Amino acid sequence: MFCLPSLLIKNTMKYIIICFLFEVVIAQQPDTAKIYPLNEVIVIRNSEHRDTTIDFYKANTSATTEEILSRSGSVQMIRRGNYGLEPSIRGFSAGQVSLTIDGMHIHGACTDKMDPITIYVEPQNLYSIDIATGTNGLVFGSSLGGAVNVQLAEPMFSETKVSAGSGYQSSAKAYNGNISVNTGTSQYALLINGVYRKSNNYNAGNGATIPFSYYEKTNLSLAGRYQLSENDELKSDMLFDDGWNIGYPALTMDVGYAKARIYSLSYNFTNNDNILSQCEVKAYRNDITHFMDDTHRPSIPMHMDMPGWSTTYGSYINTQFDFLDNHLTQLRAEFYRTFVRAEMTMYPPIGLPMFMLTLPDARRISGAIFVKDEWDISNDINASFNGRLENTNSLVTSEFGRQQLSVFGYHTENAINTLLKSGTMNLTNRFSENINAIFSVGYAERMPTINESYGFYLYNRFDGFDYVGNPELQNEQSLQSEISGRFQTEFMQIKGTCFFNRINNFIIGAKDGTLSAMTIGAHGVKLFNNLPFATMRGLEFSLILHPQDNLEIISTTKYVQGTDNDSKPLQLIPPLKNLTSVRYRFENITVQSELEYASSQNSIRTSVGEQPTASYLLAHIRASYILLIENLQISLNGGVENLFDANYRDHLDWGNIPRPGRNVYISTLLSF
Amino acid sequence: MLLQKKVFAILFFALIVFSGCKKEDNPLAPVNPTDPFAGLTKIAEGYAAGAATKVQLWSKTALFTGYNNVFIAVLDSAKGTLVTDAHIHLDPMMDMGMMKHSAPYENPTSTIAVNSLFPCQIVFLMASMGGSWTVDVEVHNHTSNLEGIATLPVTVADKTPAILKSTVAKNDSAKLFISYLRPSSLKVGINDFEIAIHKSMAMMSFPFDSTYTVVITPEMPSMGHGSPNNVNPTHTANGHYKGKVNFTMTGDWRINLDIYKNGAVVDTTMYFDVTL
């Protein structure tokens, strides 16, 4: 049987390194080892680090980007189906976190957030994932909960490499394949990646099949680099992602077809001897199309079409200066424009079709300036300051859209213009060779999302309410602080973080009993409004033990609490979670066993009908074997996830749908 | 080369002129706005002998069951010119053979014509199928000081969905006619909602009534939901009640009416169906 390209990563790029660095850009600086971690950067693909064997994040070689993200120290995924999981950072999600691909803003085209942009990047096309918490993500956007920036893999100069492979997962009878070709001379380089995935309905623990959990997709990316001189080059990326028949068991509709087209062209300059040491200029455009589909669902009261479209284009210039000794300054200016339209047409058994705009031709233009300065005050003390100013202009461009919102008494003829001001300060102190600590305070503002401002009867299956946007919402404002410490020896690293975040004007839906629900079966209508404030606080703890060269133990623990101004719990706050993995390498064979624990979550927002979740404990076991025959490298991976076939659901999963039961996976990768 | 350029220039110019001409030919462009009959269709005409005038009845559309905006044109029989200062009184009549009845109407509000015509309103209570409608127009020509009556036969068609409803009041058994003054176009968003309430006194008199309380509840029958922030119609003048009705999407809507008088239920079963 011919299996299309498989999803394994080339061996040289297969290992994952946890780099605790400020930014990927700075990662190349030779003396950054002393800089204390602020952002978590998961480097997936780096041939120079092939001997570093921390294969923690991408434990399952068939894993998707979403699965890698979910293993990060601060990210948890909101799950509506087996596909399209939405990252949440320390309990913040949606408009509170910024998601970018190579710094590019992309707006989902789905009114139900079925299409977080992380689905558009396959792990084999991933260079790294940069996860910033709180105001440390300001470089990527005006967000208060953090940022996830996905860096695409770059073609390598003077290298020719081909790899292909495939994999199979038993729980969903899913198979996938990939092919990757890198070709390059000293002047140009080209990288082509293709991925195909097909997943059937998966089985939950105890064997029940979860209907509408299937999906199928292809992802094709082309990247090219052209060296202009020793110090500068041109780079272009094109990404084509097509998904179809994507089931969402927790929603009332599936996705018939989802298409993303992402293009960028950039100019890069690097010269460490210059005052201007780095400069990147990028222009980009992306178009997302999203068609929801209910034709496979039995006994729907009424068929409906719900297409959505988004187009974003923009550009940014990112520079790094060495003005002063012991200072590193980053300046970034960006501009982007987003247009979103989503429609709903319902076909009643009798009578005319009914039409409305669920996202009413909204366009948003943003211009922003970001400045950051890192200052090595002494060998042991480092301070960094950053600030972002962003001006955003939002408008409903169609008369139809404005008339719809006028029904709620909103006047949207005029654009909403708002200036967002954010900044943060970090202070790092190295107390000794082994111990350092960081303290940071920050302030951030974020404006309401297009859904929150202009959405029109967006049905939210989580609480069963139709949501209507509110153009008069105030910006969310967050005051946050974080303190963390790290103890490190040759054999171990312990890190603990404690954070606090107060959000004024917290945006949340509030039920309006006078309104009647549009969606058949919905409980009512909620209007977005501002709560006086909410707070989020939590702890993160990680332990890495390296007692001998071929043995490694990693354990991460995360906990967050969120409450509103009445001290009532916020919704979708993850419970305490721990993931512990033990990894043992013997020559070409690596064996890894994991325990994954989540406590029960009883701090729930009862007013929105949130359900408590029971605790769960899962065991996984994995093994990999690498065979080298001259230039040909064969890598075999296999394992069992959810070994004891536990039937469980995570608190962030919508709709009480259990997660996959025992999953046996196997994959191979050939590369030369 | 020069010649070629000139030819192109001429062609280009011609193209612009041509496209300009095409625009003027556009049938949707407004015709001469001073033409009093612009956009109107002549429904009927007759002579008001004593007043030495010809009387014409014009309307934007053919007449239908419900509230009709009509225009009376009074022409001097001798000169053929439009008389613009006259007192007009209407008297619509339905002859069903065995019985006759009139209908609610609103005479011109002024003796001075508006753009040479006299706008007035008639609520036809039924279609011509059940009998024959006439509209008597009594004219007092103020210029010549002559008076006369013209009898104009008109044809009235049924309207679907209905914009006229009748009921017998639950509180006092009054026979009521409720006319919906449906705007020429309805849109998603906020729309004017205007109704007129007339009472039947015997069969020949239909005075308006300003004493009712009206509550409107729009709904989409196929979905079972309504719309928010509607403004209940309140009495303005001459039995007209004005409010606002909101539609959140296109499709078939039903505007339910609950009518009360001094707190007592008059009728809660009435509705107007609209499509947008």
Image (tube, coloured by chain):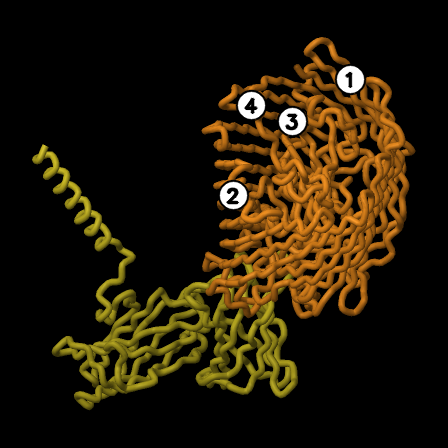
Chain colours: A orange, B yellow
Q: Nearer the viewer, residue B36 or B25?
A: B25
Mark count: 4
The Cα atoms of the two marked residues, 3 and 2, are separated by: 45 Å
Report which quarter residue A477 is drawn in: bottom right
Question: Residue A323, labelled with which disc?
Answer: none
Find residue B187 and report its horizontal and vertical position in percent: 48, 62
The Cα atoms of the two marked residues, 4 and 3, are separated by: 26 Å
Q: Are marks 1 and 2 on the same chain?
A: yes
Question: Residue A275, labelled with which disc?
Answer: 2
Looking at the image, is mark 3 or mark 2 earlier in the sequence?
3
Of circles 1 and 4, the one toward us is 4
Whether residue A374 is situated above or below residue B44 in the rendered picture: above
Q: Residue at x 47, y 80 (%)?
A: B240
Report the chain holding disc 4. Answer: A
Q: Secondary structure at mark 4?
A: loop
Q: Residue at x 53, y 70 (%)?
A: B245
Looking at the image, is mark 1 or mark 2 earlier in the sequence?
2
The residue type indicated by label 2 comes to Ile
Residue on which the image places disc 4: A157
